[in-house]
Image (spheres, rainbow, N blue to C red):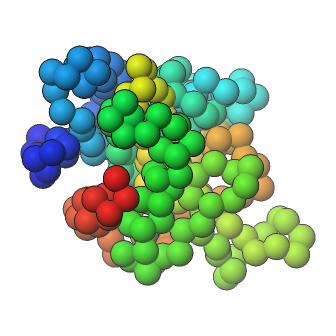
Amino acid sequence: MSTLNKEIEWIISEGLTDFRQAEAFMETRVQEIWQGDEPEAIWLVEHPPLYTAGTSAKERDLISPDRFPVHATKRGGQYTYHGPGQRVVYVMLDLNKRERDVRALIKKLEQWVIGTLGSFNIRGEIRDGRVGVWVQRPEKPTTLHGKIREEKIAAIGIRLRKWVSYHGISINVEPNIEHFSGIIPCGIKDYGVTSLVDLGLPVTMADLDVALAKKFKGIF
């Protein structure tokens, strides 16, 4: 693990991090942040292939329940996939010292993702009724008559405890896109999933981490 920020502990874990171990770390850290024993933290990880179910997950959206481990979580949202090639960013911030507004936090997370994607000349967009960050793919056919195809490049799911946030965002760098087919991501049909590499950009995980760090301060 390495730290990049003195005010907020910025942690990057090498290799693949067990999901339940990550949850346990966050649960402990959130309590420590609330008590004032540890600083706020941004934790960047990759997980082995798995599906997670948020508090709004619907059983019908889990298409392949035996394909990968399925973990119920306390974060908001529905089913998501995590796996190698996807940067998961766990955001542990004390809203008691910031702004006690979960919607404002989510908006800032969206801005952070969009700004980071902009570093690679990708236009990320938000859509009403569709969680996450999306990109247009006009070169691809669409099942939605008269509309440009859009694909999801980043997911957002947050939990608060005593106004300290945890869980966070995931950005697709170069995951196996086919692995998303075992779920209906976030319960949203008729839209695809993409990644930085799928968009034709030779971006590495390290490249993304640098961009995330640069864009963070201006927003938070």
Task: Please tell me in which quadrant of the rendered image residue 125 appears.
Answer: bottom right
Instruction: Write the residue at 32% across / 71% down.
Output: 203
Residue at coordinates 71% horizontally, 33% vertically from top-left? 61
Residue 38 in the image: state x and y as whole percent.
16, 27
Between 100 and 81, which is closer to the camera in this rendering? 100
Please, is residue 128 above or below residue 186 in the view?
below
Give the residue furthest to the right: 145
In the image shown, does 2 or 51 lie closer to the viewer?
Answer: 2
- Left or right for 15, reference 47: left
State the image coordinates of residue 127 (x, y, percent, origin top left): 69, 59
Q: Residue 11: horizontal and vertical position, in percent?
A: 18, 43
Picture coordinates of residue 168, whole percent (x, y): 43, 40
- The vertical placement of 79 against 141, above or below, is above
Residue 205: in sight, yes or no? Answer: no
Q: Residue at x 76, y 75 (%)?
A: 148
Q: Is residue 62 left or right of residue 178?
A: right
Image quadrant where one finds the N terminus: top left
Residue pictured at 35% horizontal, 45% vertical: 89
Compared with residue 182, is residue 23 higher up or lower down, i.e. above or below? above
Instruction: Say which of 100 and 18 sits in front.
Output: 100
Q: How many marks?
A: 0
- Asked whether residue 126 is in view, the answer is yes
Q: Is residue 107 above or below residue 50?
A: below
